Amino acid sequence: MNIGIVCYPTYGGSGVVATELGKAMGAKGHEVHFISYDQPARFDYFNEKLFYHEVGVTEYPLFKYPPYEIALASKIVDTAKSAKLDILHVHYAIPHAAAAVMAKYVLKESNFNLPVITTLHGTDITLVGRDATYGPVITYSLNQSDGITAVSNNLKQDTLELFPIHREIRVIPNFVDMERFSKKPREHFKMAIAPQGERIIVHTSNFRKVKRVQDVIKVFSKIQKRIPSKLLLIGDGPERINMERICREMDICDKVTFLGKQDAVEELLSIGDLFLMPSETESFGLAALEAMACQVPVVSSNTGGLPEVNMDGITGFTCPVGDIDLMAERSLEIISNDDTLRRFKSAALQHAMTYDINAISPVYEDYYREIIQQTKVTA
């Protein structure tokens, strides 16, 4: 198959999943064409089956905002023809689904059939999608897609409640590359972070308000009062300045390390003892899954799709959003005892293995073939 993939090129979950899926398809011998305004963050090596097509947007004084959707649709049309795409897989509904549907109908004018699959990742539905301004276009774009997938059952239900969707939504969960993430911890690095054998608490995100990153610091503050601990914060974003301020106010700056954005996040996760994820909403929780793949148990909120990933009492614990005291108590329950921590670490790894990319990518591959066949019948 010749597969087109449209995604955001950033470190967010949708871009990571799209890129890793494309790389997996390339490894299977399919030709994969990434279409975006920048090279995806994890498109990090050369492969003769992987291609990148940059969407250029023309600056013009008449436009207050550059017309990215039109530029994207035009690039899809051009790539579909030149690469003879068999299917287009767009990740994140806004604006990718709308641009894909526009391109699909432009291509029909020249008798080129391009099946479109839209994968919903979460905030495209639960946050941006709640804006009534976008509702009619999102609804139309999803109903005109040839296939729709959602990364969790919770997201599927949210989508059906918010939009009058007439097509089946197939749930295909996110995944993790176990070969990449099941790394042995680098003991010298762990010793540098925690020279006195302190427990290492980790959080990774894009530091937006929805991630409740200030709760991470507040929970950690309670943990470190009871057991010697260090906190690693991986990522960056608009809330970082507030996080740094809280660290100073709580006088814990010497126990907190801001590492910024990191490509080899698995090497940092592998030295962790606990992962904190107190998000306001998560339709899946890819960062939690990646932590579990590194044998790091998770204490998370119980919102959205997180309970489908983080098994309460097994791979960690889920707590009500904003319940800092309970999150701290559950964290201490895991890390205070070595035997208990080993049990949670083992369970986290075993659960993560069920989401291995080698188990999930064939599901997408079969779905591609199914949608291609269906559109041939109805074309």
Image: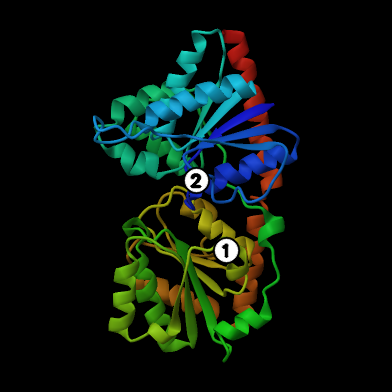
Query: Do we see residue 328 in this rendering?
Result: yes
In the rendered view of the protein, which quadrant contains the C terminus? top right
* Residue kind at label 2, given as amino acid type: Pro
The residue depicted at 49 percent of the width and 84 percent of the height is 229
Give the Cα separation between the discs numbered 1 and 2.
Answer: 17 Å
The residue depicted at 55 percent of the width and 31 percent of the height is 89
The local crowd at label 1, few if under 14, some if 14 to 19, many if 20 or more residues have their Cα within 10 Å, is some
- Give the percent coordinates (x, y) of residue 251: 33, 86
Q: Residue 319 occupies which quadrant of the picture?
A: bottom left
* Residue kind at label 1, given as amino acid type: Val
Left or right of 369 in this view: 37:
left
- Give the percent coordinates (x, y) of residue 175: 61, 48
Query: Do we see residue 173 in this rendering?
Result: no
- Give the percent coordinates (x, y) of residue 266: 61, 64
Name the secondary structure under disc 1: helix
Q: How are the residues colored?
A: rainbow
Residue bearing the label numbered 2: 9
